[in-house]
Image (cartoon, grey):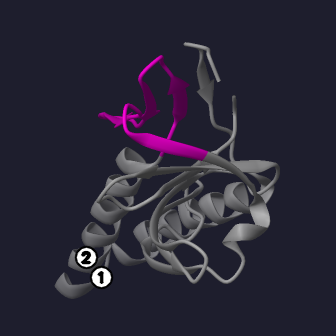
Amino acid sequence: MGTYQKHYLKMDKLARIITMLTYVFIILLFVFLFPSGTFIAKASLVAILLFFGVLIFLAPIYIQRTPNSIVIGKLLHKKVIDLSSATIDQVPMDILEGAIRTCASGGIFGYWGYFYSKALGHFRLYITYRTGNLLIIRRSGKKPIVINDVF
């Protein structure tokens, strides 16, 4: 884990399908509802577009390891995780079995957000594919963060 290289995250097949179906759904809504729709239909469509736009900006794009931190790059900002008082464990993907999505994407641009499981409690997840190992970053007084092991 001693590299400064950015590891760009690629979505697995299911995440790509969910993302593309969402694009198609929004385009169809726009084509059929917006031109002749009521005010409520148009307002709903604008709300969906805004929500989808927020998802684009929150989705993880890359992970970078520096000597003292892990950086999760997003479209508008970076989430820097200070490792000075953190422990990092490598675990298999099956630790996520039975995890409940509490406030997270449903596969759009990957799998990320807030989750809960008996094994981990409440945690944040930033993964884009469901194969290989995961890293769990635990910091005192904060929710664990789970990322793909790209290092």
The reply to whether dot 1 and dot 2 touch (C-beta < 8 Å) is: yes
**11 horizontally vs 80: left or right:** right
**Residue type for callout 2:** Lys
What amino acid is at disc 1? Gly
Which residue, given by chain and number where applicable, does mark 1 sit on? 37
Q: Which residues are magenta?
A: 60-88
- Magenta run includes residue 101: no
Residue 83 locus on image (x, y percent) = 41, 33
Find numbered disc 2 in the image and state the secondary structure of the residue it sits on. Answer: helix
Mark 1 secondary-structure assignment: loop
Residue 52, x across and y down, in percent: 39, 60
Q: Residue at x 82, y 49 (%)?
A: 132
Question: Residue 75, located in which quarter of the rendered image?
Answer: top left
- Seen from the viewer's position, the closer of residues 16 and 88 is 88
Instruction: Look at mark 2 in the image and give the residue it sits on.
Output: 42
Residue at (45% x, 73% y) in the render? 29
20 above or below 79? Answer: below
Which quarter of the image is occupied by the N terminus? top right
Q: Residue at x 54, y 32 (%)?
A: 62
Could you say where residue 25 lies in the image, as x and y percent from the top left?
54, 70
Q: Is residue 69 one of those drawn in magenta? A: yes
The x, y position of residue 116, in whole percent, is 49, 78
